[in-house]
Image (cartoon, coloured by chain):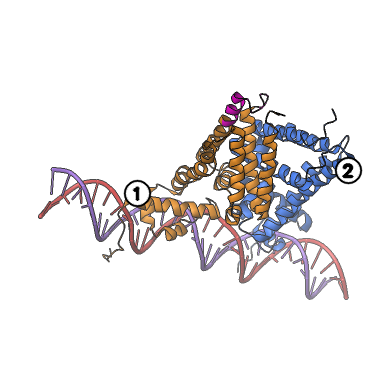
Chain colours: A orange, B blue, C purple, D red
Amino acid sequence: MPKRPLKRRLREPSITREKLLQAGFIEMHLNGFQAASLDTILARAEMTKGALYHHFPDKAALGLAVVDEVVRGFLLERWLGPLEESGGDPLAAIQRALQQRADSVSAEEVELGCPLNNLAQEMSPLDERFRRRINATLDAWTDGLAAVLERGQKGGSVRPDVDPRRIASFIVSSVEGSYGMAKGAKSTRLFRSNLGVLIGFLETLRVRSA
Amino acid sequence: MPKRPLKRRLREPSITREKLLQAGFIEMHLNGFQAASLDTILARAEMTKGALYHHFPDKAALGLAVVDEVVRGFLLERWLGPLEESGGDPLAAIQRALQQRADSVSAEEVELGCPLNNLAQEMSPLDERFRRRINATLDAWTDGLAAVLERGQKGGSVRPDVDPRRIASFIVSSVEGSYGMAKGAKSTRLFRSNLGVLIGFLETLRVRSA
DNA sequence: CCCTTTACATACCGACAGGTATGTACTAGA
DNA sequence: TCTAGTACATACCTGTCGGTATGTAAAGGG
């Protein structure tokens, strides 16, 4: 029973938890969940194992919290947010959101890939809890897109024969696929090109006013 | 130095190697490369560690061989092969290949995902050798599609303003993205729907004969 | 028939993983 | 001020992993 002095600690649970989530997100984004090392996460967060296991029962709980609280935030900010700023017709709003992402994407972002897609590919077959939460997030994205398309239909700018949910799913799949392929090819050019084709495809859904 | 009797062995190196590759492929398809356990692979192949390390210097070499010799074969058989049977115009050949895959896809295939896509997502950021080989395979796919589109352009059935390579990349990305999303959603329906939308998109590339 | 080479089999190792047991320091409430 | 519970810190444990050292049996050339 050694009674040596201990390291000082923050004793601010919400901050500690947030640090763990952020460090967990970075490590998971770099290495995936399974290969994510708790020791590395703790080193980055400047925390110890005691802190981690005080806030989370196990590694999976940390991972799930990262999905819910960090990854989901990214999606809202990067894809659903820009969708809300709907100046002009709805279809153009989607196209604008895509173009914005194509323009502002960095080499680092492409090489790391979309965190949501990365986790989906890795964890969906392995853990049902991960699969459900990741899918819930992706569904939110699909729902957002479908709602915009539907608005376009009611406004008369989107062709009435298109199925909003089908198209929305296709958009999500194409974007995630583009993230994946661009990551493999290490090519922002490929990413931009793909989003460009997708934008062109969306144009074919517009009622031709000419 | 125990001089106990040993287990009988095949002593047919090419068969042994093939068994290891097949078992390796299955394990990698189920769990990814990093999480693939050599012991599990050896159990499935009914081999021992001695056999494995006689044929491959390390785990990575086995994984790379699986990519080159097994995964690549799948792509050729499932996507590039059907492209060759080109009755009718080239665009229709691509559409037929897509439709064929949509029709024949099984629930198991969807839940496991495309092995090439799975490995691409997992290994591209981690190992440059994997990345190069996986990308070479994906490029072969893109090249095949681009060649067909180009033939269509020369034959006058595909609009002259489309960029074959851009479209080919987009097709590959969309298909892989659809594999990924369908895997996460555990939904063959989603996969089929997405390929349906993609087939519809390809139709917009045709010169309108009407 | 011997002897070298090939083709494995078996036993073992160090590294690192996630997880736990237990101790300590700070804090809020009585 | 005392105390109980919170919020950590530290040491350690066990299992699994990829990898290796060393042994043995079969095949082929001389």
**Residues flagged by tags 1 and 2 on a common chain:** no
Residue farthest along the front direction in this orientation? A210
Answer whether residue A104 is visible to the viewer in this image. yes
Q: Position of residue A206 (x, y in %)?
A: 67, 31
Mark 1 or 2: the one toward you: 2
* Above or below: residue C18 compared with residue D26: above
Which residue position is annotated with label 2?
B154
Q: Could you tell whether A76 is left or right of A14 in the image?
A: right
Q: Could you tell whether A154 is left or right of D7 in the image?
A: right
Residue B132 drawn in magenta: no
Q: Give the position of the N terminus of chain A as an image quadrant.
A: bottom left
For the point 83% across and 38% down, the residue is: B158
Which type of secondary structure does the marked residue at label 2 adopt? Answer: helix
For the point 70% across and 42% down, the residue is: A197
Which residue position is annotated with label 1?
A14
The number of numbered badges drawn on the structure is: 2
Give the extent of the magenta segment.
A148-162
Q: Residues within 10 Å of mark 2 (few under 14, many from 20)?
A: few
Q: Position of residue A76 (x, y in %)?
A: 50, 41
Q: Position of residue B1 (x, y in %)?
A: 60, 69
